[in-house]
Amino acid sequence: MLEWVPQRTDDGSFTFFSETFGEAFHSMRGARAEAFEKFARATHLRERATGDRLCILDVCYGLGYNTAAALETIWAVNPYCHVTVYGLELDVTVPRAAVQPPLIESWSLALRPILVELAESCCCDRPNLTARLLIGDARQTIQTLPYQGVQADAILFDPFSPRRCPQLWTVEFFAAIARCLATEGVLATYSRAASVRRALQLAGLHIGSIPLNPDAALPHEWSQGTVARHDGSEPLPSLSPMEQEHLHTRAAVPYRDPSLQGLPETIQARHQQEQVASKLESTSSWRRRWKIH
């Protein structure tokens, strides 16, 4: 079993660093804060918690923070709301390491035994919860969910970055994800990459931006991520003119994986070739126009 070493983030919560992907699992500015701000709040779980039932799909469950933030948000409003959670995770050692002290201490006393049971048994049932953790390549495990009738009210989409994990940011994978999104459901991801946003559009979803937190934004930032949904009748936070133009540059060439089995290197190489052949405006030209450094 890999040894996962806790790293403290700026809000006092902890994350891990993946040597395989060369990235931390969370923003070092605050792992717990990121789970609430970019996922639980962006999918409007507080507003939706007044109903009897909610279904959540957590893509790349990892340390379980996004699910934990979602459950704390929902049950703070309505402790009787029954939540169904499906978590997709490649490596079961990650959630199991995340329920050890001091990481587990980021969460409420009521939530801790739930996270422990889900990590250790890959399932947890309570009067107000049905949770399942599906271990394996998410490109394969996602394909079992439509047959179970899964229609998620919120999809928490949190893989490693497209450059490190291109296989989970493709048009084809987003199409599979979209089949599990309820008609009025919302998908949220931390990524603001033009390639990601274009892939979501090609998968048939409407997109919006997650607005910056003015108190925490850095000068070079323009968005905290992306939200998407099927029905464009209920508006999402609009993309700025700068963000809209970004979708017409070579940065917006999406990743593709027609078989949903491609190797990351193959997907990355195809993406680079398509960018080189693209007639779209260069991303460097767009950056100069908008004075982005």
Image (spheres, rainbow, N blue to C red):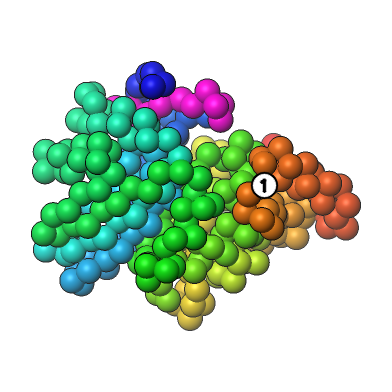
The percent position of residue 11, horizontal first and vertical second, equals: 32, 31
Left or right for 29, reference 125: right
Q: What residue sits 34% from the left and 55% below the top? A: 86
Q: Categorize mark 1 by other alpha carbons within 10 Å: few (<14), some (14-19), many (20+).
A: some
Residue 149 to residue 166: above or below: below
The percent position of residue 41, horizontal first and vertical second, equals: 34, 55
Residue 107 to residue 56: above or below: above
Q: What residue sits 22% from the left and 65% below the top? A: 49
Q: Residue 277: in sight, yes or no?
A: yes
Magenta region: 11-22
The percent position of residue 141, horizontal first and vertical second, equals: 46, 53
Q: What residue sits 51% from the left and 66% below the top? A: 178
The percent position of residue 54, horizontal first and vertical second, equals: 27, 66
User: Closest to the observer: 218 or 204?
Assistant: 204
Q: Residue 78: in sight, yes or no?
A: no
User: Closest to the observer: 160 or 127?
Assistant: 127
- Magenta stretch: includes residue 201: no
Residue 277 to residue 160: above or below: below
Left or right for 238, reference 4: right
User: Quarter of the image containing the N terminus?
Assistant: top left
- Residue at the disc numbered 1: 262
- Magenta stretch: includes residue 12: yes
Q: Secondary structure at mark 1?
A: loop
